[in-house]
Image (tube, grey):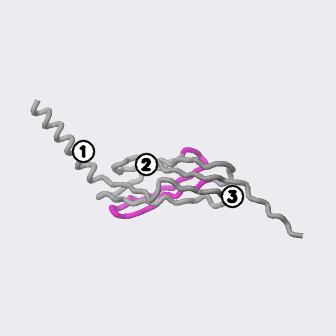
Amino acid sequence: MKIRLLLIAMVLSFTTVQSQEAPQIVFDSLTIDYGTIEKGDDGVRIFRFTNNGTTPLEIKQVRSSCGCTIPKKPDAPIAPGASSEIEVKYDTQRVGPIRKTITVSSNASTPVVALKIKGEVIEPEEEEEEE
């Protein structure tokens, strides 16, 4: 019984030490609001984040909930204390509401983070010709 308790204590302490040494990904914002934009407007937005951990942060995968949103992840690991960004490009040729999720997988203490984009794409207003 004592050996079992000792093993449990060792596993718990290892898990605690391991999580303290893991990278920590902290985003400036988890949601970007495009607001109301016109069809064909610039659909690129940036999610900025910092590695607040003590070891390098590796972004393993970034994927979107549909093909209308293209995320771009950093290629190199992010050093402790350093910042980087994930670029997201939404296809603004699609008129209607924007409600998409971008899932970020990494080696951070929180290995999966869900980012959101929202807004609405409208048809451009036609300019009236002056006479």
Residue at image x 54%, y 44%? 65
- Mark 1, Cα crowd under 10 Å, few <14 / some 14-19 / many 20+, is few
Foreground residue among 94 and 28? 28
Q: Where is residue 43 in the image (x, y as percent from the top left)?
A: 61, 58
Q: Which one is earlier in the sequence, the residue at label 3 or at label 2?
A: 3
* SS class, disc 3: strand
* SS class, disc 1: helix
Disc ID at residue 98: none
Q: Distance between the residues labelled 1 and 2?
A: 21 Å
Quarter in which the C terminus is drawn: bottom right
| Residue type at the position of mark 3 | Glu
Look at the image and say whether residue 80 sits in the magenta stretch.
yes
Q: Where is residue 10 in the image (x, y as percent from the top left)?
A: 17, 41
Magenta range is: 65-90
Quarter in which the N terminus is drawn: top left
Q: Decide if residue 105 is on the left or right side of residue 23.
A: right
Q: Distance between the residues labelled 3 and 1?
A: 50 Å
Disc ID at residue 38: 3
| Residue type at the position of mark 1 | Thr
- Mark 3, Cα crowd under 10 Å, few <14 / some 14-19 / many 20+, is some
Disc 1 designates what residue?
Answer: 15
Q: Position of residue 3 (x, y in %)?
A: 11, 33
Judged from this view, the residue extending furthest toward the left is 2
Q: Which one is earlier in the sequence, the residue at label 3 or at label 1?
A: 1
* SS class, disc 2: strand
Disc 2 designates what residue?
Answer: 113
Judged from this view, the residue extending furthest toward the bottom is 131
Judged from this view, the residue extending furthest toward the top is 1
Depicted 127 relative to depicted 16: above or below: below
Q: Verify CB contact (< 8 Å) between mark 3 and mark 1.
A: no
